[in-house]
Amino acid sequence: MIGAGEVSAEEVTRAHLDRIAAVDGQVHAFLHVDAEGAIAAARAVDSARARGEKLGPLAGVPIAIKDVIATKGVPTTCASKILEGWRPPYDATIMERINAAGMVMLGKTNMDEFAMGSSTEYSAYGPTRNPWDLGRIPGGSGGGSAAAVAAYEAPLAIGTDTGGSIRQPGAVTGTVGSKPTYGGTSRYGLVAFSSSLDTPGPVTRTVLDAALLHEVIGGHDPRDSTSIPAPLPAIVEAARLGATGDLSGVRIGLVREFAGEGAEPGVAAAVREAIEALVKLGAEVVEVSCPHFEYALPAYYLIAPSEASSNLARFDAVRYGLRVGDDGQHSLEEVMSLTREAGFGPEVKRRIMLGTYALSSGYYEAYYGQAQKVRTLITNDFKAAFEQVDVLVSPTTPFVAFPFGSRTSDPYQMYLADLYTIPTNLYGGPAISVPAGLSEGLPVGLQIMAPTMADDRMYRVAAALETVIPPLTPPALSGSNS
Ligand code: GLN
């Protein structure tokens, strides 16, 4: 409609800013709204259109950005006190690409501090609430991006996925969450959590939207040393092909080892129905064995904290944001220590301690080294499975959105949210979560995993499922201007 001149980018942007003003007091998806910047960006698109310039498919479309992405001149906190007040002097590569596409950034979204968590309850600025039930979590770490999209505050958003933080929030908010192949989207300008796992990607309401956004942000970036120097697969084409609803010839694998592992009955039932729907569209279902997947969670909780403990050493009270105790009475080391004590929350401190321990001399081989070996075994499981099938499917997460406070007292209960998503991160392949109906009135997600650099396959299957299970809309928020 923007391209055809039926509506201006400014009108679309104002409508979303109005929606944010109406509902974000309840949802708290945003940490920062940049209304002025958004209107200016929208006007630039409208004048480019008036001049007759050719616009890309997403020009003038608003987008919300997870607060872990560096945005030039716009606050970037990672939902941590330690970065309060920091305004990056540069844009992340994916932001440069979003801006170049003429997209309109609405603001920065809430998350678990430094992307560590599965509920946004670890945000230093208070949690985001799930638009489906304001007493429940929106998933995490990217709960703000998912809730913003689910609540119609933004049509599109960006998340980052280290262990499931795009897919699990997608599942529990009834949105689409796509984690590209590791190295298929640039990490340059992402505040690093676990560098060998971090992957930015789309959060949207439809599969085609995800593919279109993936195409804008994806592709090789010489500024990221692990970026893959190859063209993106034809993902938009694959999403359109899937939308024809024909999956004949597609082989779908069910991981035997996932079957016994604790999905709630309502989640398991919705996923079973989604798989039956895929079979009706022509897909063939094959059971495969991935015997090392059961070690993914413990391996992840050595690798991710180890890398995090090293990455978070840069928050030293000198270079960014917060500084505590700089009064002439304390030594440099004391200022660093006071700043880190005040600036990091409990989950971040837990990860730094775990990671530092796992990397310490004498323990390195026993913990980090061992976890890396497990990572290789999991990769081999994926490779063997993909010799038999085109994609693997599973529930995205074992349970629907849980009530606030129900998993914060035991870290392990929180870690279980990523039981099904973490193997993919350790392997580096792409995976997407798509709505698979409801359980007790709350959204369930189906996860579709594909081989590395075969992101097109997951988009095809996901778009086909959408022809049977249409996008979900949450019940109206009170006082909203829907
Ligand atoms: N929930 C996982 C963790 O806490 C994954 C986080 C993520 O993907 N950023 O580490």
Image: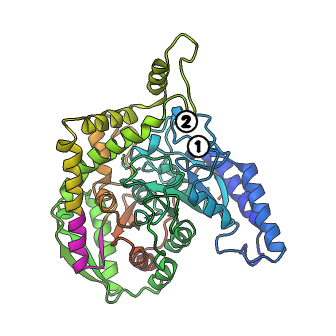
Image: magenta residue range: 379-393
Residue designated by label 1: 76
Give the residue at the far top of this rendering: 329
Q: Amino acid at mark 1?
A: Thr
Callout 2: SS: helix
Disc 2 to disc 1: CB gap under 8 Å: yes
Q: Quadrant of residue 258?
A: bottom left
The residue that disc 2 covers is 83
Rendered view: 205 above or below 234: above
Q: Residues within 10 Å of mark 2 (few under 14, many from 20)?
A: many
What distance separates the C-alpha of mark 2 from that of mark 1? 7 Å
Helix, strand or loop under label 1: loop
Where is residue 157 shown, x and y percent of the image? 56, 59
Residue 348, percent from left and from top:
39, 36
Which colour scheme appears in the figure? rainbow
**Residue at the spot 30% in from the left edge and 58% down from the top edge:** 426
Residue 142 position in % (x across, y down):
47, 51
